[in-house]
């Protein structure tokens, strides 16, 4: 069996190339997900392990419940992060979008916006999605700006939805409709 679950080719943008995830990406994924700048913006805050990632690959990616790609800089060929659709629902043509830029030096360069646009277009065209949703901390202003630039609209603010170390946080729900 191939190490690559997606039959799709890479997605090429102006600054980025998105390619299907492989088992060989585990080390990078674990390092990126444990980056404090990434971790602070995830609802799932546990330390990420290779076993957790391999379980994700074997139970979610392999069965098509998740489609995940690696974000690569065109100019350097360096892998810098990941985009994914989770909870893909073929009956309702919907999925939840997620992204993280795991390399600090690659943050703030517009890569998140380009990757979000490229991958949501891929979701609408290749996966035949009608609705792509996401959740983001209300305090994550940079991510919200990225998502809005990529065409996502605010749908609702859930007050005090999560609590970490006794501090409640608001979660903004956003979506992009084909």
Image (cartoon, helix red, strand yellow):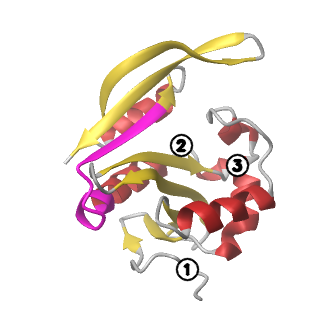
Q: Is residue 6 visible?
A: yes
- Residue nearest the observer in this picture, 78 or 18: 18
- Residue nearest the observer in this picture, 13 or 160: 160
The residue identified by callout 1 is 4
Answer left or right for 87 relative to 55. Answer: left
Kindly report the distance in space between the C-alpha atoms of the residues bearing marks 2 and 1: 29 Å
The residue identified by callout 3 is 33
Query: Could you say where residue 79 lies in the image, as x and y percent from the top left?
Result: 61, 66
Answer left or right for 30 relative to 41. Answer: right
Residue 14 - label = none
SS for callout 3: helix
Kindly report the distance in space between the C-alpha atoms of the residues bearing marks 3 and 1: 21 Å
Quarter-of-image position of residue 168? top right
The residue identified by callout 2 is 108
Please tell me which residue is depicted at 36% across the width and 39% down the height of the picture: 133
Q: Is residue 53 above or below residue 116?
A: below
- Residue nearest the observer in this picture, 144 or 75: 144
Which one is earlier in the sequence, the residue at label 3 or at label 1?
1
**Quadrant of image for the N terminus:** bottom right
State the extent of the magenta-drawn residues as a range.
122-135
Which one is earlier in the sequence, the residue at label 3 or at label 2?
3
Kindly report the distance in space between the C-alpha atoms of the residues bearing marks 3 and 2: 17 Å
Quarter-of-image position of residue 50? bottom right
Q: Is residue 128 magenta?
A: yes
Q: Is residue 29 above or below residue 23?
A: above
Which one is earlier in the sequence, the residue at label 2 or at label 1?
1
């Amino acid at each position: 069996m191939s190490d690559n679950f997606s039959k799709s080719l890479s997605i090429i943008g102006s600054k980025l190339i998105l390619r299907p995830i492989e088992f060989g990406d585990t080390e990078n994924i674990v390092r990126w997900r444990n980056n404090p700048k990434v971790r602070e913006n995830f609802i799932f805050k546990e330390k990420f392990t290779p076993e957790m990632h391999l379980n994700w690959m074997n139970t979610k990616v392999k069965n098509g419940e998740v489609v995940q790609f690696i974000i690569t800089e065109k100019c350097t060929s360096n892998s810098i992060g990941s985009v994914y659709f989770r909870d893909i629902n073929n009956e309702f043509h919907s999925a939840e979008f997620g992204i993280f830029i795991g390399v600090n030096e690659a943050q703030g360069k517009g890569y998140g916006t380009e990757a979000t646009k490229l991958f949501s277009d891929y979701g609408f065209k290749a996966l035949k999605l009608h609705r792509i949703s996401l959740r983001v901390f209300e305090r994550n202003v940079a991510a919200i700006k990225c998502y809005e630039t990529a065409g996502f609209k605010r749908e609702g603010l859930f007050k005090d939805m999560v609590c970490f170390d006794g501090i409640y946080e608001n979660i903004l729900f956003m979506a992009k409709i084909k």
